[in-house]
Amino acid sequence: MNGPLKMYRTRQVVRHDIAVQLPDCMYKLKNIHAARNGMVEQRTDHVSSAPKKVDICDQVKQFLKNNQNLPEMAALELRQEEILRQLADLKKQMDNIRNNLQISKNAAVTSQIIKPKQGPPPSLPDVIINASPTNPPYSLELVQKLWKNYMFLSVKSYTHSSLSSLTENAQQLTKTLESFKPGNVPKINVKLIWKDVGANPELVVAHSRIFGEVNILRYLARVTSDYLNYETCNNVHEIDALLDVCYNIVKSKTKTERASLLQVLNKSLGKSQWLGDRSQISIADLAAYSAIKQATNPSEVNVNLGKWMQRCVACQ
């Protein structure tokens, strides 16, 4: 059998001459095959690209160009010229003052802290300190020693009726404070009332209350002249930060938290005699000494801080 065979005809599966009803619920896209095949797309109902963003500088220039003839713009320009003229006059006045005072333009500005002159002890009202037996204010013991030739901190202790007994540490501190023998100096009467006030003792003076041992020390430092007054020092901010650390040591609840705070004190102490790289004791040392005795165990204190605490006890 020679030659091609005649094939049978199949039924049409897909018809292309049927009009297709396109849905109108979606937006229409541009024919992406038209440009690729050289075809011209006549339909314009496609998604257009975003308009080109205009630079802010161009917008300002265009705005000024469109509004340059407005009376408000002219008034604004006159006001700007007036301000520039006043600044030029002020600069001339400053130059004249500098020349009259014979000050160089490159002169360095130095900050000098004016220290108050030490005078006689001020007349202070009697104060009341409410303290908890579980958190004795050990800093009062050091204040007595440092003020022995300046002012006598005469302490009389009382026990509130809400307490049945005092702790051993509170009894020992009471004995030390009441048995202190001062010199012939003015005195300030302090009533130390043992009561359950929590970790923060309270100082009551003239019907006002001061909470926290570090704030009590701040009060005592500010009502005196040179003794314990740290606000005339160059590192006043560092001492304030150390006082905040001492407050947090007393309020700390975990050994890990106390360890990080003690590390801050140890770093501040370094190889110096006192905290803050100082050669003399300050209220930061008093607050830190009391906070460590209240809230830590001897095993938590390293050798460097241990020697520093011995110096605090021996301070005069």
Image: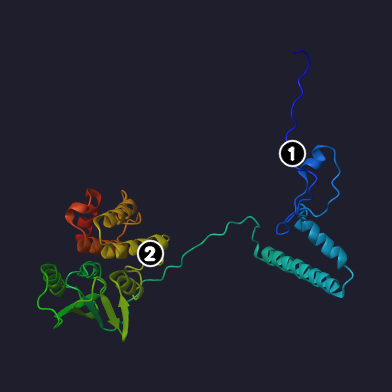
Q: Quadrant of residue 7?
A: top right
Location of the N terminus by quadrant is: top right
The residue to which callout 1 is attached is: 12
The secondary structure type at the circle numbered 1 is loop
Q: CA distance from mark 1 to mark 2?
A: 94 Å
301 or 274, which lies in front? 301
Quick check: 245 above or below 152?
above
How many C-alpha atoms fall within 10 Å of the one at disc 1: few (<14), some, or many (≥20)? few
Nearest to the eye among marks 1 and 2: give it. Answer: 1
Quick check: 4 above or below 215?
above
* Sequence-earlier tag: 1 or 2: 1
Q: Amino acid at mark 2?
A: Asp
Location of the C terminus by quadrant is: bottom left
Q: Is residue 258 left or right of residue 92?
A: left
311 or 295, which lies in front? 295
The residue to which callout 2 is attached is: 240
Name the mark on residue 139: none
Tell me, yes or no, whether the two marked residues, 1 and 2, touch with CB atoms within 8 Å: no
